[in-house]
Every structure is written in structure tokens, then in C-alpha cells.
Image (cartoon, rainbow, N blue to C red):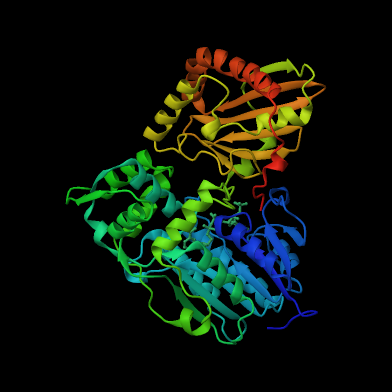
Amino acid sequence: MSEKGGSVTILLTGATGYIGRRLKHRLLNDGDVTLRLFVKQGQSVTQREKVEVVEGNTFDRESLDKALRGIDCAYYLIHSMGSDNYRELDQKSARNFLDACIQNKVKRIIYLGGLGEKESASEHLLSRIETGEILSSRPESIQTLWFRAGVIIGSGSASFEIIRNLVEKLPFMITPQWVNTLCQPSAERDVIEYLAQASKLNTEESCVIDIGSEMMSYKNLLLGYARAVGLKRTLIPVPFFSPKLSSYWLTLMTPVPYSVASALIEGLKSEVLVKNDHASTLFSTIIPMRYDEAVKAAVEEIKHTQIISRWSDASGEAWEVNHSDLADAVFTDRQIIPLEGIPEEKLFATICSVGGNNGWFGYELLWKVRGVIDKLFGGYGLSRGRRDPKILRLGDSVDFWKVVDFQENKRLLLFAQMKLPGKAWLEFLIKENKLYQTAYFYPHGLLGRLYWYSMFPFHLFIFRGMAKNLIRKAHNNLPHPKDAGSFRA
Ligand SMILES: NC(=O)c1ccc[n+]([C@@H]2O[C@H](COP(=O)([O-])OP(=O)(O)OC[C@H]3O[C@@H](n4cnc5c(N)ncnc54)[C@H](OP(=O)(O)O)[C@@H]3O)[C@@H](O)[C@H]2O)c1
């Protein structure tokens, strides 16, 4: 691997995603890397010290070429899971990336996919395998290190959140037979460590590197979590749990929506086991954390709100429905309230505390009912909560909302990810010594209009109460988010 001035020049894609954000953090701690991020929206990178940011996406060849110029090693941490035709998009994206890497004389691609075999893979896993195959298809021109990991145990990972919610909420669990399927989980810290060290690995060969700790059934994954946190739980596997029923159950009991739950359930049917020993031979200094240690570490991070990233951080399609659509909104509800001497930064800090355990500035019961309705329709409900109780950053999910614009002390724009017959936004704008709180709704057809009119009486007092309570709360002496000492990675 060639180095410039002793430092490897790295391109990190997927830097706003679950793995990418954590890897960025780890690589920056390394000191002797030059790091460039390739992101769809430049403004989503809140911490810009010591990094160069190139905006673009893998379907735009020009942006890829710009990002890959002068790069030694490129991480590929991208997938198109949110789209209906994700398999086709995944293939196109991987091909574009490979071609651009070869043309720009990149020496190494590092990719993270999933454990599992093609013959028994779910549709989602198959797409991850096809991506790995494409990225490794030109070993004569470029080296590819293809990591494969199963369930990742770390704060904010979707699989971990499912395990945590099921075990903590249910003393008895009637489970499908698939809980006896074997898997090999990986601690999130190990995954990040393998990926980070891979940029400096002294080998020229392309290879597949399977990572995972001890082999166990999904049942023991659940029981192991319970033991690690001192809970007693009983699991009773029964034959009548269909994949559909299991997915609905997960949607109701955990923060994941139906689409994510059903993809995960489909994957539970087949074993996901380590098939080679390349991890231990190539990375002899990394001793995989035991499952119980990984659980305890993740729980500690959650306790101390040190969560760098969550499974729901990636923006997906949220950016594309941003500002320009606001002007087209058919229905709006605007509340304007004078600041009454409240400093703008204090009001903004209060605005940024919205959601999760902090609630929605009044009428909490109604918000909870709306959350349950969303869950019943397969949405996120309120169960995603917040990553951090005080700090928000662009791309964060807040219950069933997503932060799509964040202008410090000026504007917070949330996009509704709840199940709706239309598109909705909630904007908090501080301007001319006033708070402008506006709900926007763009209805889809007649159903969308009926929805807005049926909600109208509730909106009347919910939004009015929200603005008033927000101002009231800002009078209390809240610390500024920057003082909270949490991550904005
Ligand atoms: N998370 C896990 O538990 C887990 C387990 C095993 C393997 N893996 C593998 O690890 C990799 C990363 O997963 P993740 O969980 O970190 O995903 P993630 O949180 O969903 O993040 C995906 C990232 O890809 C970016 N992206 C998507 N399409 C793009 C495009 N066309 N051009 C540029 N950027 C694009 C997204 O940007 P935006 O934010 O702008 O949308 C986001 O930063 C995947 O290959 C996955 O299969 C993950």
C-alpha cells in the first residue's frame, strides 16, 4: 500500500451510516491517515476537522472520480436497501465504484458485507453477496478485502436494538422455531477495528475475511443478553409463528419498522457462520470480544449516551423530499410567538430537545396514540426515540421524524417518516425575535386530504400547545447542547 508522507490516503463512503460514522471516528484517532469522506449531502458532516468532504453519489461518475483522485484505499460501506429495486441499484453502484477505483489507480477496496451463503441467502443478503462479488471481480487490477459480519452487537445497531427491546420488555417469549438457527455475532468495536486496521494490512492478495465471535443460536443471543444485564427470561419456541406474524411482532415490540423487521426475519432462517480463519491469521492482535462482553459494552454506551451512530441515521430518501417540496405543501399550520427576551440559542437548545423521552411539548398521550397507530401500520412509531437527549444533528431520527435541516440557533426542519397518505414536515424557525413553528402537509389524493381534515381538530390544540410550551420551557435554564459532552461524530 503506497503512502503519502507516511500517511495512507483514505476515501470513506457511507460516512453518514451506522458503520461509516464509527469508522470515521476510529480512523481519525489513528493520526497518520489522510481522510476524505464521500457523502450525498455535504451538510450532513457535522465534524469536519481533519477531513476533506466530497459531495456526490455512486451513480454520478464525475463525483466518484473527484472523490477517488489520489486515494490509496477506498472503503465501500454503501447499500440501497431503502429502495424497491435495491438489488439492481446495489449492482450498478458497485460496478461504478469498481470502475472508478481502477481508473483512478486506487490500490485497495475494503468492503463490509454479511455472513451467509448464496444458496440459502435472503434477498437482502444476496444483494450484499453480489456487491462483494462485483467489487472483487478484477483482482488483477485492484485488491479487494471483503469482510463478512453477521449480527453486530453495539449500541444503536438494528439487531442489537431488537434483542434489547425484546428481552427488556418480555419476561416470557413465544418464539418461532428459527430461534434455534446458529449465528456468530460480532462486537461493533471488533468490526470497526478490523476495518480500520485493514487500510494498513501488509498483503497484496484479494480475500474474503469472515469475522465473528462464539457460535450460538438466536435463542442464546436473547438469553445471553438477559444474563449479561441480570434479567431472567424464558423462551418457548412454537411451530406456528409464520414469517409475517414474526415481522409484525417485531414491528410492534421493537423500534424497527415492518420493512426492516421482515428483511431481518427472512435472514434468520439460514445459518450465518464464519467460513474461513483469515481474521485470526491476518489480524492476530484482534481477539474477538465475547458476546456477553459486547452486550455489556453496548449497554454502557447507551447508559452514558455515548452513541456515535444508530441504524436509522442514514438519510435514505429523506434528503430528496427536502426544501423544494415545502413550497408545494397544500396545508400548513403556523404558530408565531415572540421570544419575550429568551436568547435565541436558549430557545434553539429547547427546540433541539424535542422527542424521545423528552416528549413533544404537551399532549403526550395523543402523541403516544399516534405512535401506536403508526406501529400498527408498520411504521417506526415513537420507539426509535433519540440518539442523544440534548444534541441533534442532521440525519438523526427522532421518534418517527428525521432531521433534514439543522441551522444552529436558527432552523430545525423535521421530515415525517410515519405512515401517512402524504408528506409532512415540522419546521421550527427563529426569525426577527419570533418563533415560527410550521407544520406542512402535502396530501396524496383524496385520502391525504381526508387525513388532514380529520386531524384538524387535534392539530388545533397540539400545535398551539406545542409552541406555547416550547417558549415556556425555554425560560428554564437549559444547558447549551455543546456543553453536554456527547458525540457529534
Ligand atoms: N449495520 C449492521 O448491523 C451491519 C451488519 C453486517 C454488515 N453490514 C454492512 O455494512 C455496510 C454498511 O452498513 P450500515 O449499516 O452502516 O448502513 P447504513 O447505516 O444504512 O448507511 C448506508 C450509507 O450509505 C450511504 N449511501 C447509500 N447509497 C449511496 C450512494 N449511492 N452513494 C453514496 N452514498 C450512499 C448512505 O448515505 P445517506 O445517509 O446520505 O443516505 C449512508 O451513509 C453494508 O454493506 C452492510 O451490509 C452492516
Q: Is residue 184 left or right of residue 334?
A: left
Residue 368, compared with residue 232, is above or below; it is above
Counting the numbered discs, the total is 0
Work out which residue is located at the far right of the displayed protein and give it: 432
Q: Is residue 150 left or right of residue 232?
A: right
- Residue found 41% across the figure and 69% down from its top: 115
Q: Position of residue 35 (x, y in %)?
A: 72, 66
Residue 408, compared with residue 5, is above or below; it is above
Work out which residue is located at the far front of the displayed protein and give it: 230
Q: Position of residue 110 (x, y in %)?
A: 58, 73
Q: Nearer the viewer, residue 35 or 245?
A: 35
Quadrant of the displayed image that contains ligand 1: bottom right
Could you tell me which quadrant the N terminus lies in? Answer: bottom right
Q: Is residue 204 left or right of residue 369?
A: right
- Residue found 47% across the figure and 16% down from its top: 454
- Residue found 59% across the figure and 16% down from its top: 465
Q: Position of residue 333 (x, y in %)?
A: 63, 18
- Residue found 72% across the figure and 53% down from its top: 47
Q: Position of residue 213 (x, y in %)?
A: 40, 70
| Residue 338 visible to an observer of this rendering | yes
Residue 383, compared with residue 1, is above or below; it is above
| Residue 312 visible to an observer of this rendering | no
